[in-house]
Image: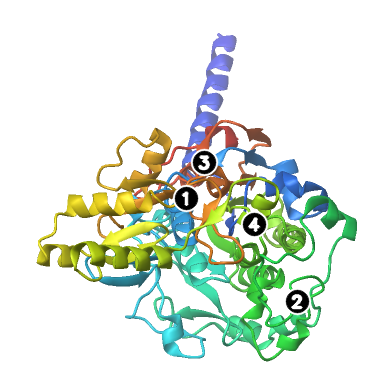
């Protein structure tokens, strides 16, 4: 009998304990990181992770992310064109231009009948800029929610979400519609600015940061080689090449660069140096400190987009000493930021993902020098020559409204007025363009036809009827729209669409993945990590291998 009551007592204790444990679990919030830091590196090819590996430091950012995080080595952009605004929007919405509406950095709006810039908004005013109309920007052109919006919604807007970048579109779009703030660099004033979409006055800490004019102290350093000379000789083209752009006035296009001449005079030049990334890294630390990011009861989100890699890449190309030096210095900046996060938020208390908005092609003349195909084809030249040719064929002027990223916009009003057959005009344009050596194919956006499935899917994913053109020029490999010097991006090929993707920190395994993943999967994976709803237009899938 005693043994019966003893067993009954033990069972009661176990039941009560289990009930108390269950109550405790119900009352305790689902574990989440204190802070998510989304890092987008503008124009970073995937192979830079490994091609420049020996130039990265043991305590730098890239080796730490690769050594402790999880890398998805076959991540691709699944749409066209592969440009900055589309990339940032895809990363944060998990969607494609057909759904989120950002079809380029600029597009011809078929309803408004004019060119539109991706984040333009004439209903707001700039804050902190030289002139109020310099900062007339907001995320209103984005049709879908972002992962940052969904985080705000999931916490009844208690989470802080802030975006920062040297480019307006690199800060505004990732921060989302419901952001607490977005700050971008104004080359005229040397300030980080915002707009009345977010606030009526910049916070005191930002005003203090701007007043320090850190760009001047960075200019004083000039730009000399960070690494030993033989590292550049081993990994790059010659120090000087005739096919790179001049970013610094009449200065020779080779190391070393005299930047002191711009101190207090021209704050835009820092964009085309690695010090633009240094400046943004310092701003990121100030945002974390003064906005108490990662110190709240709910998860915060800081979106950081490093833009100077794009400016340097466009001017000098992937095989230049300048680009290698820029990535070696960015490695230091990322390492310093991770160290700062460890000290302020706490090691393993935050999650980071690092990716790119697009990659980039080799300079055509560099390819040609080594017997590899490459060339140039200019959007402006296509528009001009087509309008002249069509006028000669039909007698009607300006049948082409615009050409953006090889996307040709027909003037439908002029076609209708002249009673021209659209199908005939499309055929005429196609036959004319196919005679050009640089052109591989011309795709009718309404009927992609027999192009390979992968390419057809990218065309369809990138087409939005309100904001896209009618015909898309598919160039031969290595051909780009880059003017006469430097390089560019925007096409479907792997050199433009193969991007890095590395996850690190709270909730992330250590490892690597070789199967194909997509830019659209990033926000879906972050949503799964945070146990929140994925963005409203998301078509991506969770990369399950990444998560613990």
The mark closer to the camera, 3 or 4, is: 4
**Mark before the other along the chain sequence, 2 or 4:** 2
For image coordinates 36% across by 68% down, the residue present is: 384
User: Looking at the image, do the residues carrying marks 2 and 4 touch, with CB atoms under 8 Å apart?
Assistant: no
The mark closer to the camera, 1 or 4, is: 1
**Label annotation for residue 162:** none
| Secondary-structure class at tag 3 | helix
Badge 1 density bin: few <14, some 14–19, many ≥20, Cα 10 Å = few
| Secondary-structure class at tag 2 | loop
**Mark before the other along the chain sequence, 1 or 2:** 2
**Mark before the other along the chain sequence, 3 or 1:** 3
Q: How is the image coloured?
A: rainbow
The mark closer to the camera, 3 or 1, is: 1
Mark 3 sits on what residue? 24
**Mark before the other along the chain sequence, 1 or 4:** 4
User: Looking at the image, do the residues carrying marks 3 and 1 touch, with CB atoms under 8 Å apart?
Assistant: no
**Label annotation for residue 252:** 2
Q: Quadrant of residue 50?
A: top right
x and y percent of residue 432 in the render?
33, 53
Mark 1 sits on what residue? 437
C-alpha distance separating marks 3 and 1? 70 Å
Quick one: 141 or 155, which is closer to the camera?
141
x and y percent of residue 278 in the render?
71, 70
Instruction: State the quadrant of the N terminus.
Output: top right
C-alpha distance separating marks 1 and 2? 33 Å
> Taking 73 as reference, is 275 above or below it?
below
C-alpha distance separating marks 1 and 4? 16 Å
Mark 4 sits on what residue? 365
User: Can the viewer see residue 302 in this picture?
Assistant: yes
> Taking 109 as reference, is 510 above or below it?
above
The mark closer to the camera, 2 or 4, is: 4
Badge 4 density bin: few <14, some 14–19, many ≥20, Cα 10 Å = many
């Amino acid at each position: 009998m005693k043994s019966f009551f003893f067993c009954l007592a033990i069972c009661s204790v176990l039941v009560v304990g289990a009930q108390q444990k269950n109550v405790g679990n119900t009352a305790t919030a689902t574990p989440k990181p204190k802070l998510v830091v989304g890092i987008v590196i503008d124009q970073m090819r995937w192979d830079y992770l490994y091609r420049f590996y020996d130039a990265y430091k043991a305590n730098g950012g890239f080796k730490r992310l690769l050594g402790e995080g999880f890398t998805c080595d076959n991540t691709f952009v699944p749409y066209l064109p592969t440009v900055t605004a589309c990339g940032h929007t895809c990363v944060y919405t998990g969607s494609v231009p057909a759904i989120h509406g950002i079809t380029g950095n600029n597009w011809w709006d078929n309803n408004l009948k004019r060119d539109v810039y991706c984040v333009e908004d004439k209903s707001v005013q700039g804050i902190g800029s030289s002139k109020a109309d310099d900062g007339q920007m907001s995320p209103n052109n984005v049709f879908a929610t972002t992962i940052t919006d969904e985080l705000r919604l999931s916490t009844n807007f208690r989470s802080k979400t802030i975006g920062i970048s040297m480019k307006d579109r690199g800060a505004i779009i990732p921060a989302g519609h419901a952001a607490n703030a977005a700050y971008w660099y104004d080359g005229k004033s040397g300030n980080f600015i915002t707009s009345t979409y977010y606030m009526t006055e910049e916070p005191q800490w930002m005003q203090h940061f701007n007043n320090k004019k850190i760009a001047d102290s960075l200019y004083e350093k000039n730009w000399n080689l960070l690494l030993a000379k033989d590292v550049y000789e081993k990994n790059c083209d010659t120090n000087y090449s005739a096919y790179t752009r001049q970013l610094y006035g009449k200065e020779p296009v080779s190391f070393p660069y005299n930047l002191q001449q711009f101190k207090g005079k021209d704050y835009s030049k820092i964009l085309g140096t690695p010090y633009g990334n240094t400046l943004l890294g310092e701003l990121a630390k100030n945002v974390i400190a003064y906005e108490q990011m990662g110190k709240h009861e709910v998860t915060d989100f800081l979106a950081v987009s490093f833009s100077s890699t794009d400016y340097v890449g466009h001017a000098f190309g992937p095989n230049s000493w300048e680009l290698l030096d820029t990535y070696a210095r960015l490695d230091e900046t990322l390492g310093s930021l991770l160290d700062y996060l460890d000290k302020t938020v706490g090691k393993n208390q935050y999650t980071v993902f690092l990716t790119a908005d697009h990659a980039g092609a080799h300079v055509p003349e560099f390819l040609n020098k080594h017997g590899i195909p490459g060339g140039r084809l200019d959007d402006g030249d296509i528009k001009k020559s087509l309008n002249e040719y069509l006028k000669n064929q039909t007698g009607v002027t300006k049948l082409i409204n615009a050409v953006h990223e090889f996307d040709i916009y027909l003037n439908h009003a002029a076609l209708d007025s002249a009673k021209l057959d659209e199908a005939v005009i499309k055929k005429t344009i196609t036959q004319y363009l196919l005679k050009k050596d640089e052109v591989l194919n011309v795709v009718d956006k309404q009927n992609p036809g027999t192009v390979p499935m992968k390419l057809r899917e990218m065309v369809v994913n990138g087409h939005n009827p309100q904001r896209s053109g009618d015909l898309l020029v598919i160039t031969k490999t290595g051909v780009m729209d880059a003017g006469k010097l430097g390089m560019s991006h925007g096409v479907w090929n792997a050199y433009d669409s193969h991007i890095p993707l590395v996850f690190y920190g709270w909730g992330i395994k250590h490892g690597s993945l070789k199967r194909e993943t997509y830019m659209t999967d990033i926000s879906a994976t972050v949503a799964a990590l945070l146990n929140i709803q994925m963005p409203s237009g998301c078509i991506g899938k969770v990369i399950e291998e990444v998560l613990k």
